[in-house]
Image: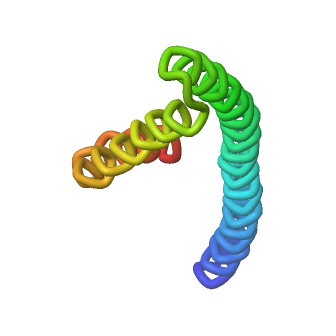
Amino acid sequence: MAFEELKNDLIGLQTEMGSYIEHSEEYYRLKIFKVLSKNATGLLQLALIGISALLALLFLSFAACLWLSELMDSYFGGFVVISGFYIFLAFVCYLFREKLNKPVLKKLSTYYFS
């Protein structure tokens, strides 16, 4: 009699473990899908906004070059001034790259692990 109860308990335990594993697998599939879909839509939004911003910056840069060229009476001078500004901006970003990493990593970690 005790062996029959033990046998029934073990069969019930095996059934419950199978159910647990099946539900865990479904949960992790949904979790992975959620993370992948958030990352994919985030990358798409970043690409669209980035491309739009770069095109706007390109046209604004040409406008500034042409405006400076008229002021300086030299196309070469206007383009050199704007190029120098971008080189200076790149140098400043290079100097402060470590300080820029921390906020970006914090933002990405909250986005990824939420």
The vertical placement of 114 against 9, above or below, is above
Which residue lies at the image location 67% right of the left edge and 32% below the top edge?
58
Mark yes or no: residue 114 visible.
Answer: no
Foreground of the two, 52 or 39 = 52
Q: Is residue 24 left or right of residue 92?
A: right
Mark yes or no: residue 84 visible.
Answer: yes
Foreground of the two, 13 or 5 = 13
Labels in figure, total: 0
Quadrant of the rendered structure where residue 70 is? top right
The vertical placement of 106 against 58, above or below, is below
The vertical placement of 69 against 77, above or below, is above
Which residue lies at the image location 50% right of the left edge and 15% below the top edge?
71
Q: Is residue 55 left or right of residue 3?
A: right
Toward the bottom, the furthest residue is 3
x, y percent for residue 103:
32, 40
Quadrant of the rendered structure where residue 1 is? bottom right
Toward the front, the furthest residue is 73
Q: Is residue 41 left or right of residue 98?
A: right
x, y percent for residue 68:
52, 20
Instruction: Identify the coloring.
Output: rainbow
x, y percent for residue 34:
71, 44
The vertical placement of 28 against 56, above or below, is below
Q: Is residue 101 left or right of residue 66?
A: left
Which residue lies at the image location 76% right of the left edge and 63% below the top edge?
22
x, y percent for residue 7:
68, 80
Foreground of the two, 46 or 69 = 69
Which residue lies at the image location 72% right of the left edge and 40% below the top edge?
47
Quadrant of the rendered structure where residue 66 is? top right
